[in-house]
Amino acid sequence: MKKITVIGAGTMGNGIAHVFAMHDFQVSLVDISESALQKGMSTIEKNLDRMVSKGTLTEADKAKTLANIETFTEIEKGVRGADLVVEAATENVDLKLKIFKEMDAHAPSQAILASNTSSISITKIAAVTARPDKVIGMHFMNPVPIMKLVEVIRGYATTDEVTGQIMQLSRQLSKIPEEVNDYPGFVSNRILMPMINEAIYTLFESVAGVGEIDTVMKLGMAHPMGPLQLADFIGLDVCLSILRVLHDGFGNPKYAPCPLLVNMVTAGKLGVKSGEGFYSYTAGSKELVVAPAFRKNN
C-alpha cells in the first residue's frame, strides 16, 4: 500500500492524514468543504510545528509530510488509484452509508475501504458495497498523531487477508493495532461510554459536582482525564450518538443516555468544539473552568 485516501478533514480525518503522510504515504484528503480542507491542513501544519519545536521532527520532515498530502473536494477524484480509503466523517450512520456507496463506486476494485467509526456496525456499512470482504474498521484514537491504539474491527465478511493487511499497516504507522469483532461499541466505547454516562448521571442526581467527579476518577482511579472532561473532549453529541447505538444494539436500559446529556446536546452545549459543555473553554487558555450551569453558587 502506498496511496491512501482519507474522507473528511475534521479532527479525526486531518489527524489520520497527518500520520499517514508523516510515514511517507501519498495521501489524498477529501472534504466537500474547501474551508474544512484549509482548516484541516492548517491544523496539520500547526501540529507538525509543535513536533519540530519539541525536536521530534525536522523542518525537512515537516516539508516532506505536507508535500505528501493533496486535497480534493470530490470523492470520485480523491479515490483514484487508492490502495486504501479511510472514511472519517461525522458519526452518523446515514452519512457513512452514503459515503461508502460513493467510495465503492469510484475506488479501484482492489482497494480496501475502512471506516474510522467509533460505534457503527462495520457489517452494516459493508452491506451497501459490492466488496464487503474488503470493508473493515480502523478506529483511531484522538489525538491521532499521539495516541498509539488502532481498534481494528472485522465485519461479518471481512477476510483474514484484509485484516492482516490492516494490522500490518497500522504497525507501519507506529501504532498498536488490536483486532476486535463487530458488536455495538466494539471494545473501547462499549466500556467507556457507560462510564461517561454514569458520571453524567452522578452529576444529574447531585451526588457530586463536575470537578469533584473528575477529581475522584483522576486521583482515585489513575485516569489521566476525568470522565466529564473526556466527554467534553470527545464531543457530547458524539457521546450521545454512541450511547444510542449501544442502546439500540443491545436493547438494554443500562445504555440509555442520561437526560442531562440529551438536554445539553439539544441546547448546543457540545463540549470543547462549542466552547462549553461541563466546562467552559476559552481559546488559548489551559485553565479548566466549570461551566456556569454547574457552578455551586448557582
Image (cartoon, rainbow, N blue to C red):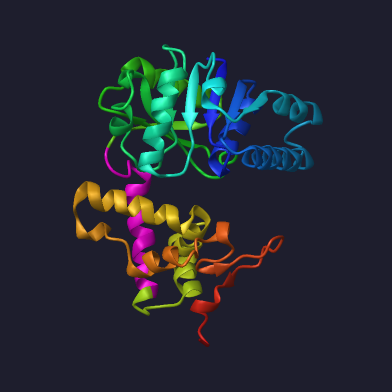
Which residues make up the magenta segment? 183-203
Residue drawn at (66%, 26%) of the image:
69
User: Looking at the picture, does residue 86 appear above or below residue 197?
Assistant: above
In this rendered view, identify the residue nearer to me: 89 or 279: 89
Outermost residue, left side = 251
Direction from residue 156 to residue 282 in the image, left or right: right
x, y percentage for residue 45?
72, 38
User: Looking at the picture, does residue 247 appear above or below residue 295?
Assistant: above
Magenta highlight on residue 194 = yes
Residue drawn at (57%, 15%) of the image:
2
x, y percentage for residue 254?
24, 60
Direction from residue 156 to residue 27 in the image, left or right: right
In this rendered view, identify the residue nearer to me: 247 or 180: 247
Outermost residue, bottom side = 297
Magenta highlight on residue 41 = no
x, y percentage for residue 35?
66, 42
Direction from residue 11 to residue 167 in the image, left or right: left
x, y percentage for residue 30?
57, 30
Direction from residue 37 to residue 262 in the image, left or right: left
In this rendered view, identify the residue nearer to me: 9 or 26: 9
Residue drawn at (41%, 12%) of the image:
109
Outermost residue, right side = 59
Residue drawn at (76%, 40%) of the image:
49
User: Looking at the picture, does residue 114 appear above or below residue 294?
Assistant: above
One can see residue 256 in this view: yes
Q: Quadrant of residue 33?
A: top right
One can see residue 192 in this view: no
**Numbered disc total:** 0
Magenta-drawn stretch, dominant element (helix, strand or loop): helix
